[in-house]
Image: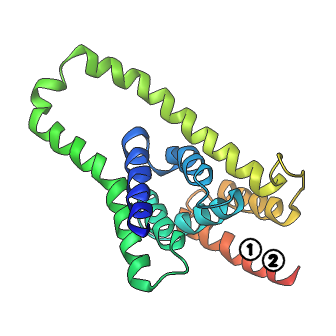
Amino acid sequence: MMLLIMLELFWVFFKIGLFTFGGGYAMIPLITDELVSRGYFTLDEINYLIGIGEATPGPFAINIAGLSGFFVFGGESFFIQLSASIIATIGVVLPSFIIILLFAVFSYKIISTKPYKDAFKVIKPMVLGFIFAAFLSITTKVIFGNFMVEVTFDYIAAAIFFLVVTIALSFKKISPIALVGISAFLGIILYGIL
């Protein structure tokens, strides 16, 4: 049973790695849909997982896959959690590895073809759409809650969001790492006090 769940987790992240272009942010809608529809996580848990994955150093997709594998087997031994984490991570990385390997072998023939150029003309706007959809999805869920269940407004999340945006716009040279740190610090302080 456990092995079947690990294989399903591998397949889920393999599909996510294979069918999303544009990096981690473009993966968020597919990650949310796959993991929630299969009952691994709730929408709130996915939002927390995305927050942790974003705040953790390293590529977002690898962080999310590793964390998902780890938390899906939360009640099991550390070895099983680590194994699931590794399997999910391999699942999300393997499609890119295979595609890059094939591209390296056949690139000199492919790059100059018209279908290749046409495909990238279509993919570029799709990536922008995926990233914008992820932004809207997470922003509305964090600030307004889940519309399907209840409409709420999280004043603290909205205040932190607008404060960090103001800081980013006021200080052009501030690094994204500092902004994530400021957000985390404000979240710990404000949610801890209120």
Q: Which residue is drawn at 55% across and 37% down?
A: 130
Asked whether residue 67 is in view, the answer is yes
Residues tagged 1 and 2 counted as in contact (Cβ below 8 A): yes
- Could you say where residue 134 lies in the image, as x and y percent from the top left? 61, 45
Relative to residue 119, is residue 124 drawn left or right?
right
- Quarter of the image with the N terminus is bottom left
Residue 63's disc number: none
Secondary structure category for the residue under label 1: helix
Q: Which residue is drawn at 14% across and 32% down?
A: 107
For the residue marked with disc 1, what is the amino acid?
Gly
User: Horizontal placement of 111 versus 137: left or right?
Assistant: left
Please, is residue 154 above or below residue 28 in the view? below
> Which class describes the residues within 10 Å of circle 1: few (<14), some (14-19), or many (20+)?
some
Q: Is residue 175 visible?
A: no
The residue lying toward the viewer, choosing from 77 and 33, is 77
Image: 186 above or below 30: below
SS of the residue at dot 2?
A: helix
Q: Which mark is residue 191?
A: 2
User: For this rendering, which residue is in front, 5 or 35?
Assistant: 5
Q: Name the residue under label 1.
A: 187
Distance from disc 1 to disc 2, alpha carbons, whole Å, reads 6 Å
